[in-house]
Amino acid sequence: MSLARKVGFVDRLVRERAFGFIKDGEGNEHFLHRTNCNPNALFDELQERDHVTFTPTPSPKGSKAMNVLRATDAEAATLAGQLENIGNR
């Protein structure tokens, strides 16, 4: 079962193995694979700390980020506010 789309940022990339990790506004980590970027070429353009939107999907090894897209400026601003709230807890 898929959850609602989330906004996050690219936390780590391992380009030579075509994967990485995204952190959402709640501090949760989601596995990112090249094939889950839409379009697939987006993975080659991503940099650590880039803002993205994605659909978190449960898997046996933890949450996977599916249908990953670059975030709009408004979505990135929402994430910044969420991260600021986490830091103030």
Image: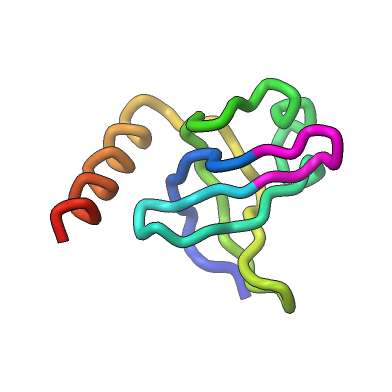
x and y, in percent, of residue 16 in the image:
85, 34
| 62 up-or-down from 26: above or below | below
How far across and down, in percent of the image, does residue 50 sit?
50, 29
* Residue 6 x/y as whole percent: 45, 52
Q: In the current view of this chain or complex, which residue is farthest to the left?
A: 88
Say which residue appears at 46% left-offset and 61% top-offset: 28
In the picture, residue 44 is in which quadrant? top right
Which residues fall within the magenta stretch?
Answer: 13-20
In this image, 17 relative to 37: left or right? right
Q: How many marks?
A: 0
Seen at 62% across and 66% down, the residue is 63
Compared to residue 24, the image places residue 80 above or below, namely above
| Above or below: residue 40 compared with residue 31 | above
Which corner quadrant holds the N terminus? bottom right
The answer to whether 37 appears left or right of 77 in the picture is: right
28 left or right of 16 in image = left
Q: Is residue 31 above or below residue 53?
A: below
Pick the residue in front: 81 or 11: 11
